[in-house]
Amino acid sequence: MKATIKGVYTHSQTGDEFVTKNGNFYIKLLIALSNGDSIYDAVFLTPKAHWKTEEVFASAGKVAPSANEIETSHFNDLIGSEIDVSTGKNKNGYDCIKKFYPAKSNADVVDENVPDEIAEQSADVDLDEDVPF
C-alpha cells in the first residue's frame, strides 16, 4: 500500500520523551496511508533494532546512517517521502505497519518502449542445423 511519512515525533503529547524502561530512545513516525487512515509506528534507536531504521530509509529511497550515527534529526529528512508498506494488526488488535518495502530504483523500472533486440535480429542461415539431444 502506498503511504507518506507525515511526521516524526520524539515526545508524547504530554511532553514526555519517548524512552523505554531500559533507557533506550525511540521515535514515532506518523504514516498516512493511501486509504485515508493514519498509523503511528515506533522506531527504536538502538544498534539491535537498526534493521528497522534501514527498512524505513530504504522504503524512502535513501541510505540510513549507521547505528552509531543515527539521530532523530535524520528522520526529519524523510517527512513527505512516498513509501510502500504492508499493514496488519498487532497482537493487541491495533493497526500497524508489518513491512516497509524498498523503493524501486531506476534499474527496477522496465521501459516498455525499448525494442526487443533479440526479436530484431535475423536468423543466421548458416546455423540452421539439426542438433541431436
Image: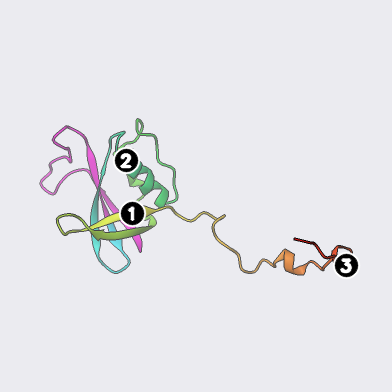
Q: Give how far apart the Cα atoms at labels 3 and 1 are.
A: 53 Å
The kind of residue on which mark 2 rests is Ser
Task: Determine whether, in the image, residue 31 is placed left or right of residue 93.
Answer: right
Q: Is residue 40 above or below residue 70?
A: below
Q: Nearer the viewer, residue 49 or 16?
A: 49
What residue occupies the far top of the structure in this picture? 68
Q: Quadrant of the N terminus?
A: bottom left
- Residue identified by numbered label 1: 99
Q: Residue 30, percent across and down?
A: 26, 54
- Residue identified by numbered label 3: 125
Identify the image's colour scheme: rainbow, by chain, secondary structure or one colour. Answer: rainbow
Q: Give how far apart the Cα atoms at labels 1 and 2 are.
A: 23 Å
Q: Which label number is shown at residue 73?
A: 2
Label 3 SS: helix
- Point out the frontmost of discs 3 and 2: 3
For the record, the magenta segment spans 1-30
Q: Nearer the viewer, residue 10 or 35?
A: 35
